[in-house]
Image (cartoon, rainbow, N blue to C red):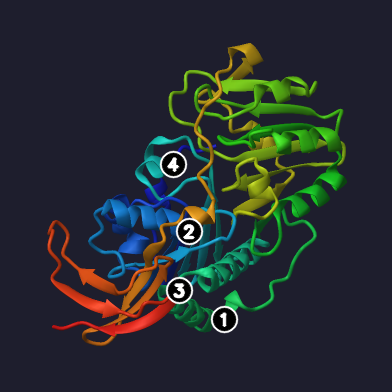
Amino acid sequence: MKYLDVASLFDGDPAHLALLSTFQFDPDFFERRLLRCDALQKARRIVVFVDSREWLRLLRQESPARLVNRRYLVVPVSQKGGLFHPKLTLVLTEDGGRVLCGSNNLTRSGCSSNLELLNTITWARASPIAGHLTVVQKAFAFFEQAAIHGEIGVGRIAKEWIADAGDACPWLKTPASVGAGERVRLVHSYESGLWSELSQQLAQDDPSEFFIVSPFHDADNAMCSRLSDAWPAAKIEMLVQSQVTRLAVPVLKRLKTVRLSELINESRRVHAKLLAWRGRHGSGCIAGSANFTCAAFDGRNVEACLFVDDSAGPVDELFDARLSKRGLAFDEFEPGVQGEPDSDDSKEPPLHLRSIVMGRANHLSLSYVNDLPATALRLSIRAPGESLPRVSVGVPRKPHAVEDVTVPE
């Protein structure tokens, strides 16, 4: 295991196209820290895909963002009945691509203070590594789907940029040879639920023990019960953090093979996600954005994770002199109270803008939702820090619409 500054992973050649996805987003941190790294500072095009509800929350807070939709494009993505929750990045250059897949949001805490788990896969045409091209290609396919599910206006631009990258880098579309011994593969929710992939692998490996790291769990610990029911003799170790990890302790006490552990002398918030197993016929792990919840593994959320075969050694190496763990009794554990973010679509405000795209001079394309019985709608534009609008124009009164409006100079 290596302790890394996330920003260091964006060093290197300037990106032809950088595609990033996150649930929570901090534009100020992104612009001040990550956007100054070599690969992004000189990148031709940058797209950040973010959960639509989180983006709406940022707009309400008027978070400082000087370069949004100027130096980089933000595409809000909706997931009906769930969350857009991946933490996947693809940096494309003329000579290859790098995939970052982990647990960290593009926020100050996600890239600086939390204890996160992040994996990188690099493929270069000059020195290709077997299997890595497939991971890069699947990451590219993921972002093609994310652009389709993004807000109409900015999503259209993202689709055009991604299509251009596919034309400029034909190896992204060339079928890669898949070897039987490939250890790493990318799995995401736009293809299938994570559980379907996981259950097939577990059936082959016949697990005798599991190791789980996740800050969030179902209120009834349904996923843990699912493992216990399928493999009743397998030991289940859950790494927890008092006052942070949300667990239903009474349910776990009824599962005889479950035990808890905690990190020693570690004050950082544990936000990593990992499910690892050892079995009679093999070992493996799944690491990425997915919490150990039904929403994550059954496909309600959009997630992205790496499956790694024969991972017993690397998982053991996570714990060394700098990071160690010990057993924890149930009675010594104090569960956290913060649950996963709400995915209830009905809680969206009845009137809100989804996106605005500036076209030719004085021309704006609006995507908006209106569930109010208003007799008239107007779009008012003001500068940050000002209370009075600089311009106000009428907008057609429709429930869900994409409209073009012209504003005065």
Which residue is denoted by mark 3 in the rendering?
400
Asked whether disc 2 touches disc 3, contact meaning CB atoms under 8 Å apart, the reply is: no
- Distance, label 2 to label 1, CA atoms, is 23 Å
Q: In the rendering, which numbered label is found on residue 234? A: none
- Distance, label 2 to label 3, CA atoms, is 25 Å
Side of 84 relative to 112 (left or right): right
- Mark 1 or 3, closer to the camera: 3
SS category of the residue bearing label 2: strand
Q: In the rendering, which numbered label is found on residue 4? A: 4
Which residue is denoted by mark 2 in the rendering?
21
Amino acid at the residue labelled 3: His
Asked whether disc 4 touches disc 2, contact meaning CB atoms under 8 Å apart, the reply is: no
Label 3 or label 4, whichever comes before in sequence order: 4
Label 4 or label 2, whichever comes before in sequence order: 4
Quarter of the image with the N terminus in it: top right
Which residue is found at the position 60% from the left and 54% from the top? 301
- Mark 2 or 3, closer to the camera: 3
Label 1 or label 3, whichever comes before in sequence order: 1
Assess disc 4: are there few (<14), some (14-19) or many (≥20) residues with their C-alpha within 10 Å of its C-alpha.
few
Which residue is denoted by mark 1 in the rendering?
170
Amino acid at the residue labelled 4: Leu
SS category of the residue bearing label 1: helix
Counting from the top left corner in percent of width and height, residue 189 is at: 65, 59
SS category of the residue bearing label 3: strand
- Mark 4 or 2, closer to the camera: 2
Amino acid at the residue labelled 2: Ser
Furthest-bottom residue in this view: 360
Report the front residue among 81 and 310.
81
How many circles with numbers are drawn on the protein? Answer: 4
